[in-house]
Image (cartoon, helix red, strand yellow):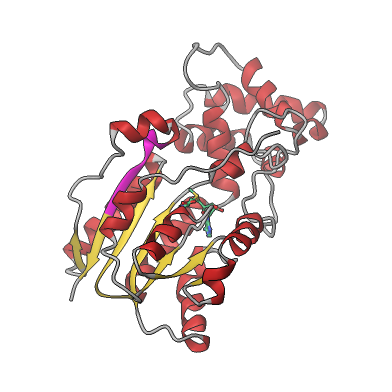
Amino acid sequence: MSEIKHITVMLHEAVDYLNVEKDNWYVDCTFGRGGHTQKIMESGGKVIAFDFDQESVNKGKAKFAGEIEKENLILVRENFDQLLSTLKHLQGTHNISEISGILFDFGTSTDQLMSDSRGFSFSNKHSDLDMRMDDRLGVKASDLLKVLPAKELTRIFRDLGGEKNAKSIARAITRMRDENPQQLESVGSLVKAVSISGRFQKGRLHPATKVFQALRIVVNDEIGNIEKALPQALEIIKPAGRIVTIAFHEGEDRLVKQTFNTWELENKGSKVTKKAIKPSEEETTTNPRSRSARLRVFERAI
Ligand SMILES: C[S@@+](CC[C@H](N)C(=O)[O-])C[C@H]1O[C@@H](n2cnc3c(N)ncnc32)[C@H](O)[C@@H]1O
């Protein structure tokens, strides 16, 4: 199978907002394929990059070996919810004075989504229903389907996926597990639960899209990680430094928006983007995945 590569979303906008200055240090909390990291380095900055996915880190270390050697890039396998402690540790072992900007490009990369074996996509029905971006995490998506009460599954599908048919899908899942819980270990089983649970209108999205997204967010504690990381980012960034976020999920964007609003009211700095910035029409045409991206920027007070 030919490799499908991640296309970096809002590359120029995100890096422009960071106001990169030569030899200053920036943190890319979501390295992925390293598109934003590369652009920051091309603009003269040095980067500390986080990714909790071993595969992303391995590929990055190979691709950017030269930059790592020159100490223009430090790439670590860490959850960005450990931002503060990791940076403090790195400041003790490297010559890093201060952090001038921090970038978050939340969610999954196309590499992860399209992987045949990791359970993020419906394309391989026999794949393990895993969905962990970090394989050190203890709970897979299939584990959740086997133990969570129908009420909780309904809440997840409705609140995190915006799935209107949430209750019937949750009921279909609990029926399947009552018959035989092992059934719920594959991608195909979840697709089946979605398809037997009701009528779906024909549209752009696969009927299981929202359910898959909601489960992925829970498995990887994506909202919890953002909640923990944003205050750490504000604490570590230098005065007048910027935090740039790109969110693809409404709940995540809302969390960033509310956090930035609160910080502004507390005089911790100001929002640089009064409203979220959307990708250009040109970008959404060439990369439809970028359609839901929302970029926000906060500048710490001096
Ligand atoms: C949307 S992709 C980033 C793409 C990247 N900006 C690029 O240009 O290639 C998100 C990446 O962040 C990683 N990630 C998501 N949540 C994370 C977390 N809490 N800590 C560390 N990495 C995380 C994922 O593993 C994924 O590789």
Q: Nearer the viewer, residue 167 or 223?
A: 223
Question: What residue is at 29 percent from the left and 31 percent from the top?
Answer: 281
Point out residue 169 in the picture as x, y percentages from the top left corner. 60, 24
Does residue 85 show up magenta in the picture? no
24 above or below 205? below
Magenta segment = 290-296
**Count of numbered labels shown in the rendering:** 0
Q: Nearer the viewer, residue 42 or 61?
A: 42
Look at the image and tell me in which quarter the C terminus lies.
bottom left
Look at the image and tell me in which quarter the N terminus lies.
top right
Q: Is residue 255 visible?
A: no
Point out residue 86 in the picture as x, y percentages from the top left corner. 51, 76
264 above or below 110? below
Point out residue 215 in the picture as x, y percentages from the top left corner. 58, 40
Q: Nearer the viewer, residue 185 or 280?
A: 280
Point out residue 284 in the picture as x, y percentages from the top left corner. 36, 32
Q: Quadrant of residue 68?
A: bottom right
158 relative position to 220: left or right: left
176 above or below 263? above
Question: What residue is at 75 percent from the left and 35 percent from the top?
Answer: 127
Q: Quadrant of residue 198?
A: top right
Q: Is residue 288 visible?
A: yes
Question: What residue is at 31 percent from the left and 48 percent from the top?
Answer: 295
Q: Quadrant of residue 237?
A: bottom left
